[in-house]
């Protein structure tokens, strides 16, 4: 199957500026393409995996990725549907940009070109911007873009209104200086992408540039993909552990799992079809979700992160923690409620495993409380390093599924 048809079959293409050109550039040539990432935070999110996976697919087919970090556009702010973005300082933008570039190198390696648009945007003076770029577009053209039109009722600053021109300059710069012919992004970026195509057309005779967008990835119930009960899922393991990421995809609904396998993994279409066939034969085993969680976590956090996520998942499911490493327990500490209380009654209350000392005592007397898998019937029991895993961690359980973690000093 051709690359273009593969992307279509995986629903990775929503808009295309020129389908004939797309088929030629993607299927018959090897060209440079780019996708931009604004450094609005200290880490990319799970939602960015949609574009990262698409970049890796193109890279596997011989196309050259250019990763654009928006050190300049991050200072402007891509218009949100509802309100103005909080402006970053230059220091914040460049610091975030360096961190995000490092993250993206983990996925795309050194065989990609990494650029920061602050390097060329900072050299454009106000008069030059208005004459060379602003003159190329009518206000009517800019007002018609979705991102702007949706903000007209609530208002939009000139700063965010100008964002599409800055992104258009990026495409022109990469087209002229890096022979980059393709830009893609989410469908919310389509207005910015087509503005770049228009600028290239107006400033280059016989230009050959292509824009592609992908659908925004939503859950089947319409809620935002990449949001968990604890909030945004980040690609930085210090913000979101491999275990949390693993659990998110392990708990994906049957209605979502096929789409996620297509959009967020590098598995072939044939492999995905077999996975789904096996899943449909025994959906209660959640085979597709397990494969999805494995593929995503291994891509983001490597084999070590995947093993850690699987170990912690197995320990909580089976209630046995003997094989967990010290690092595994550190992950567990991010997942469970923790306390430093050494008295069992106080610990049960601190970990919300009991609402009062009376209830705590009742649970203990009814043999509903265990410490590191051993039933405890003494309400005066106190924890010590001798009882602890790695002389530090004690797992307190009430009933079959309610856990808490004591961390000893």
Image (cartoon, rainbow, N blue to C red):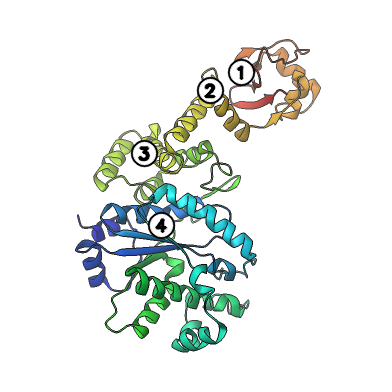
Q: Nearer the viewer, mark 3 or mark 1?
A: 1
Q: Position of residue 130 (x, y in %)?
A: 52, 86
Residue denoted by label 1: 389
If you read the primary sequence from the N terminus, does the residue marked by circle 1 or circle 4 appear first? 4
Q: Which residue is painted at 54% across and 17% down in the image? A: 322
Measure the C-alpha gap from mark 3 to mark 1: 34 Å
| Residue 35: % across, % down | 41, 63
Q: Helix, strand or loop at disc 3?
A: helix
Residue beneath the point at 27% across and 44% down: 273
Disc with the residue nearer the chain's start (2 vs 3): 3
- Which comes sooner in the sequence, label 4 or label 3? 4
Residue drawn where x is 51% and y is 52% of the image: 45
Up-down: is 398 above or below 47? above
Question: Separation of disc 2 and disc 3 at Cα?
Answer: 26 Å
Helix, strand or loop under label 2:
loop
Do the residues bearing badges 2 and 1 touch, measured as CB atoms within 8 Å?
A: yes
Give the residue number, with chain letter if any, for mark 3. 288
- Where residue 86 sits in the image (x, y, percent)? 65, 66
- For label 2, the residue is 324
Above or below residue 61? Residue 26 is below
């Amino acid at each position: 199957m051709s690359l273009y048809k593969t992307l279509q079959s995986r629903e990775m293409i929503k808009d295309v500026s020129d389908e004939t050109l797309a088929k030629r550039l993607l299927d018959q040539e090897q060209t440079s393409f780019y996708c931009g990432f604004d450094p609005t935070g200290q880490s990319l999110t799970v939602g960015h995996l949609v574009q990262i996976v698409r970049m890796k697919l193109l890279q596997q087919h011989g196309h050259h990725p250019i990763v654009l970090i928006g050190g300049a556009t991050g200072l402007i702010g891509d218009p949100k549907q509802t309100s103005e973005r909080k402006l970053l300082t230059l220091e914040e933008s460049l610091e975030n940009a360096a961190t995000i570039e490092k993250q993206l190198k983990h996925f795309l390696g050194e065989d990609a070109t990494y650029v920061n648009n602050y390097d060329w945007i900072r050299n454009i003076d106000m008069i030059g911007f208005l004459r060379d770029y602003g003159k190329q577009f009518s206000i009517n053209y800019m007002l018609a873009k979705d991102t702007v039109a949706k903000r007209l009722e609530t208002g939009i600053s000139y700063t965010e209104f100008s964002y599409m021109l800055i992104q258009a300059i990026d495409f022109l710069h990469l087209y002229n200086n890096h022979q980059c012919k393709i830009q893609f992004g989410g469908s919310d970026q389509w207005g910015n992408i087509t503005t770049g195509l228009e600028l290239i057309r107006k400033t280059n005779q016989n230009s050959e540039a292509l824009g592609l967008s992908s659908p925004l990835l939503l859950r089947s119930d319409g809620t935002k993909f990449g949001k968990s009960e604890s909030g945004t899922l980040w690609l930085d393991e210090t913000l979101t552990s491999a275990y949390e990421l693993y659990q998110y995809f392990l708990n994906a609904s049957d209605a979502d799992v096929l789409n996620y396998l297509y959009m967020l993994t590098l598995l072939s279409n044939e492999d995905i079809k077999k996975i789904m066939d096996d899943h449909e034969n025994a959906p209660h085993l959640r085979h597709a979700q397990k494969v999805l969680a494995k593929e995503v976590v291994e891509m983001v956090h490597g084999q070590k992160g995947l093993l850690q996520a699987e170990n912690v998942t197995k320990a909580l499911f089976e209630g046995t923690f003997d094989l967990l490493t010290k690092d595994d327990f550190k992950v567990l500490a991010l997942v469970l409620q923790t306390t430093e209380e050494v008295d069992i009654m106080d610990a049960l209350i601190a970990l919300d495993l009991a609402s009062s000392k009376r209830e705590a005592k009742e649970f203990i007397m009814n043999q509903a409380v265990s410490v590191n898998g051993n039933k405890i019937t003494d309400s005066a029991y106190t924890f010590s390093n001798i009882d602890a895993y790695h002389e530090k961690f004690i797992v307190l359980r009430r009933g079959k599924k309610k856990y808490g973690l004591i961390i000893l000093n």
